[in-house]
Image (cartoon, rainbow, N blue to C red):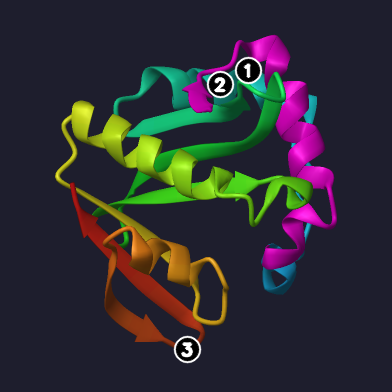
Amino acid sequence: MIKLVQPQIKELKYRKKLLKDPQTMAFNKSNGGTVDFNEKIWQPWYALWMNDTKYYYAYIYDDTLKKYIGEVSYYFEEEYREYVLNIIVEAKYRHLGKGKEALELLCKQAKENGLRFLCDDIETNNPAKNLFLDLGFKEVWARENITMLKKRL
């Protein structure tokens, strides 16, 4: 069973590990791949993501494995005037249904937080696109290599 857990600031070392894993971040190759989540930015990052209502962040916790296996988030993207989500599951836990469970939980959480819609702007050839479509997201536009998917909550 999967649940979403908002981490304590000291637990951000997991996010650092997640974003530095080349296999997990392979989907981000066109944007540089891995990301350096330096400890120097943890305090302001945490203050924003945990205290601003336009932001939501949580780890994906697997009760069976008794460990974190990824992260989910959403934030209000001014350019789109929409709430855009993010989901990253560690590479070794993909294709097991855990991402689907986590995405369903994120949609439920967003609805409980008062959101009416949730979107994701993903690369058009990203295999995760099918997961979103299976969960009721609809393609609202595509340009260059990005597709915007949107779901009414």
Where residue 44 sits: x, y (%)?
57, 22
Instruction: Kindly check if marks 3 and 2 are in contact, taking CB atoms under 8 A apart as contact.
Output: no
Q: In the rendered image of this protein, does residue 60 appear above or below residue 87? A: above
The residue tagged 2 is: 46
Where residue 137 sits: x, y (%)?
29, 63
Q: Is residue 116 left or right of residue 125?
A: left
The residue tagged 1 is: 43
Kind of residue indicated by mark 3: Glu
* Magenta span includes 101: no
Instruction: Kindly check if marks 2 and 1 are in contact, taking CB atoms under 8 A apart as contact.
Output: yes
Q: Which residues are magenta?
A: 1-27
Which residue is located at x 72 percent, y 25 percent?
A: 65
Where residue 129 sits: x, y (%)?
47, 70
Q: Regarding mark 1 in the picture, which secondary structure is present there?
A: helix
Q: Regarding mark 2 in the picture, which secondary structure is present there?
A: helix
CA neighbours of label 3 inside 10 A, class few (<14), some (14 to 19), many (20+): few
Which residue is located at x 36 percent, y 65 percent?
A: 134
Kind of residue indicated by mark 2: Tyr
Q: Regarding mark 3 in the picture, which secondary structure is present there?
A: loop
Which residue is located at x 25 percent, y 54 percent?
A: 82
Q: In the rendered image of this protein, does residue 132 appear above or below residue 93? A: below
Q: Which mark is residue 144?
A: 3
Kind of residue indicated by mark 1: Gln
